[in-house]
Image: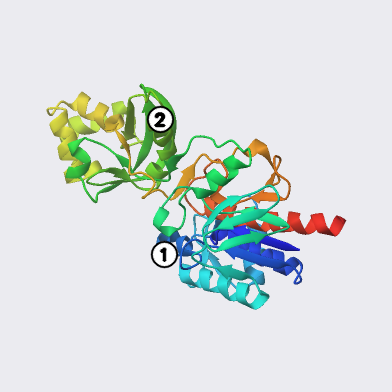
Amino acid sequence: MTTIIIGAGASGLACAIRLKQNNSENEVIVLERLSTAGKKILATGNGRCNLSNSSADGCKKVLDFFSSLGLVTRTDEEGRIYPYSNQAATVLDILLENCEKLGVEIITECTAEAVDRDLTITTNQGLFMADNVVIASGGMAQKKLGSDGSGFGILKSLGHKISPLSPALVQLTSPSKYPRQLKGHRVKCNMSILLDNRVIGSEYGEVLFADYGLSGIVTMNLSHIAGENFISDRPKKCHAVLDLVPEMSTAELTEYINKYKSLKGILGTRLSAIIEKQADGNADKMAEFAKNWKLIINGTKGFDFAQITNGGVKADELTDYKSNLADNIYVCGEIIEGNLPCGGFNLNQAWLSGITVADNIGEKYDKN
């Protein structure tokens, strides 16, 4: 049995190794368009590879897989799981070493251009034939790291529908001068995204001000709302609203301001100076701004800065990652529609989907 995997990213490499673990006689070939495999893995978790989360679905299965490869992990207080070395390179090295040990063939600088229903794959290095094809080519996020969106075209040619694609886990841009004035300043607050003044999503956590707008985990987690909005034919007015002091009511803040004549003791010098100037020193307005600080959002930083792609191949056209429209075609990783929050959830899903595809292929042949 020959299985060809398109894409040597997280899901593709996990799938390849699991296939060989399940049956050493399987021929497994991975086609990678870049000159090296797993380049995007090195960039995850700020170079530390936040490979899973203790709260993620299927986390145990993922950790058992990595344990079988000899990777030791550690978990932080927020449930984020990293390699014990805190180096993404360790994860990639372990994956590639096991590919070599198990006999997985990785062909680099090989771009898959088309997949026919007879499982013939056309590439820039010629034709390949397979018994199973796994499309694990990633989404649109960070093309330079391997995800160029080419897999969507292949799946379309096989009859699959692709839901609208937009950047997710990405920074938001704002024309407001205030983020620029606060560049590098971090706040713990409640952030809401409004479309035409209607709250679409809210989350508490850290927001980072930047010269282009807003970053930080909360911004990233809510960014898919803005991303979807700005690719629509008629985008709505988008705002980020920050409750800078969620632990206090507006009345409590007003009382504080009347007593101390400033918000400096709560917000610090830089941020309080901006709020006070906006409110012309009026205590009621200062409290209102601190609880509902509205910033215009006019876009995202785009796919080049996004960690993942929102949208993709329609999940209802797959059964356990197997195509319902083309025989012996499997799909895993970021190319499937949907997005998950920061903290290892998306990478966990990539590993898990690759492992599950391999197990499903193995079960199919076991039944025969």
Q: Is residue 247 left or right of residue 57?
A: left
Q: Amino acid at mark 1?
A: Gly
Residue 225 image-quadrant placement: top left
Determine the residue located farthest toward the front in the rendered image.
126
Mark 1 lies on a secondary structure that is helix
x and y percentages locating residue 218 in the rendered image: 40, 43
| Residues marked 2 and 1 touching at CB (< 8 Å) | no
> Against 99, is 348 above or below?
above
x and y percentages locating residue 51 in the rendered image: 53, 60
- Image quadrant occupied by the C terminus: bottom right
x and y percentages locating residue 366 in the rendered image: 84, 59
**Residue at left 72%, top 63%?**
2
- The answer to whether residue 54 of the structure is visible from this angle is no
Point out which mark residue 47 bears.
Answer: 1
Determine the residue located farthest toward the right in the rendered image.
368
Q: Amino acid at mark 2?
A: Asn
Q: Which residue is mark 2?
A: 229
- The answer to whether residue 293 of the structure is visible from this angle is yes
**Residue at left 66%, top 36%?**
316
Colouring = rainbow
The residue closer to the viewer here, 71 or 288, is 71
Residue 101 image-quadrant placement: bottom right
Q: Is residue 267 left or right of residue 46?
A: left
The residue closer to the viewer here, 6 or 95, is 6
Point out which mark residue 214 bears.
Answer: none
